[in-house]
Image (cartoon, rainbow, N blue to C red):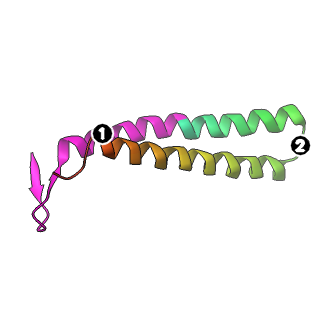
Amino acid sequence: MAQDTGSGRKINWQNTMTVVSAAILIGAEVFGAAFAGSWAIANLLGIGDVWARVLDVFFLVCGAVIMWQFIRSAKKIEPFRT
């Protein structure tokens, strides 16, 4: 099932949905691990709430980079347009 985008290329919905579904699953794991990791490190080191939030942001940015790289790699294997 493909939809014409007007430029002569068609959206391959099967590949698009496969990558989006995998990204949702992997994103939940990556961002869950980011929050759990920042919480664990903050409690282990005994740093305050402010530094715990700083760790949250740092690990979430790392998670976003990981997700961006995953989607870029997945698009090469499962192209969105044909």
Q: Residue at position x 90%, y 37% from top?
A: 46
Within the magenta stretch, is there residue 5?
Answer: yes
Within the magenta stretch, is there residue 33?
Answer: no
Question: Which three-letter amino acid code belongs to the residue tagged 1?
Answer: Ile
Label 2: which residue? 47
**What element does badge 1 sit on?**
helix
Observer-nearest of 64 and 79: 79
Which of pointers 1 and 2 lies earlier in the amino acid sequence?
A: 2
Confirm whether residue 20 shows in the render: no
Mark 2 Cα-neighbour bin, 10 Å: few <14, some 14–19, many ≥20? few
The part of the image, by quadrant, that contains residue 73 is top left
The part of the chain drawn in magenta is 1-29
Label 1: which residue? 77
Residue 15 position, x and y percent, is 23, 42
Residue 26 position, x and y percent, is 46, 35
Q: Is residue 18 left or right of residue 56?
A: left
**What element does badge 2 sit on?**
loop
Tell me, yes or no, whether the two marked residues, 1 and 2, touch with CB atoms within 8 Å: no
Question: Which three-letter amino acid code belongs to the residue tagged 2?
Answer: Ile
Observer-nearest of 10 and 46: 10
In the rendered image, the residue lying farthest to the bottom is 6
Q: Could you tell me which quadrant the N terminus lies in?
A: top left
Observer-nearest of 53 and 65: 65
Residue 2 position, x and y percent, is 10, 50
In the rendered image, the residue lying farthest to the right is 46
Q: Residue at position x 53%, y 44% from top?
A: 66
